[in-house]
Image (tube, rainbow, N blue to C red):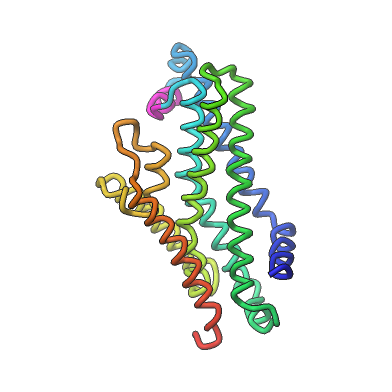
Amino acid sequence: MREALWAELLKVRRSRLPWITALAFTIAALVCGMFMFILADPARARAFGLLGGKAQLSGASADWPGYLALLAQAVAVGGLGIYGLIAVWLFGREFSDHTATDLLALPTSRTAIVAAKFVIAALWALLLALLLAGLGLLIGTLLALPGWSAPVVGEGVARIVAAAALGALTTAPLALAASVGRGYLAAVGVLFGLIFAAQVVAALGYGAVFPWSVPGLYAGIAGPDQDPPGLAGLLLVAATGAAGVVTTARWWNHADHTR
């Protein structure tokens, strides 16, 4: 496991994808901060025209609870796409770079290789969530948002991290899609399909029982009038993540017998 983790960390360090994902989360924090900047002054919002209208539609309030909630929603909605790309890259690159056969011939167990990839994906997701939360605290301080208190900020940061964890769990099956599809293309298609389905199912009112819609509902993307997903929805997300990990490990352990 130690050797597998070291190899995966080396691959990540030599890739540009970590910087790209960090840039995406940085932009998300800046956009949420821009919404707060506009919402803090209605006259300024009207001066911005259409942009001000979009900020009002976000449903956020120009204070710390509203800003932290908006950041959690950004993680929940964007997390499926970004975390999904991470999972697809970690597993699909082995086939695109023609290194999958070499991995299968290594003395390191295939279960350890798969586990190392998922550990890297989990740490990556956590670091991105902490980056967003840290930038959010900095931007909120610069904007002098009202409503600061240690409990409010602690709860807001915890919600951001929880939304990130839920989003990351739902991307585990994409590792199987990248493995079975032997590359990026099929898995990216599955990712786009899941993003589309999550929006449609949530709009139909069944998001609480559709794992890929649960992170957004948990973060409050549907507004204060929508009940958050219950324990059943959270357990479905956990089951989806566990199923993705187990089936991916099983596929890699039998990869010699697949075509």
- Residue at the far top in the pictured view: 43
On whether residue 119 falls in the magenta region, the answer is no
Left or right side of 233 for 10:
right
* Count of numbered tags: 0
Give me the residue at 68% from left, 70% from top.
1
Seen in the picture, residue 158 relative to 118 is either above or below; the reply is above
Give me the residue at 37% from left, 52% from top.
196
Q: Percent x, y for residue 155?
A: 51, 32
Q: Which residues lie in the magenta part?
A: 50-59
Give me the residue at 47% from left, 32% from top.
70
The majority secondary structure of the magenta stretch comes to helix
Seen in the picture, residue 72 relative to 173 is either above or below; the reply is above
- Residue at the far left in the pictured view: 204
Give whichever of 242, 27 is nearer the camera: 242
On whether residue 53 falls in the magenta region, the answer is yes
Give me the residue at 40% from left, 42% from top.
218
Give whichever of 96, 67 is nearer the camera: 67
Q: Percent x, y for residue 6?
A: 74, 65
Q: Percent x, y for residue 20?
A: 64, 49
Q: Percent x, y for residue 140?
A: 58, 24
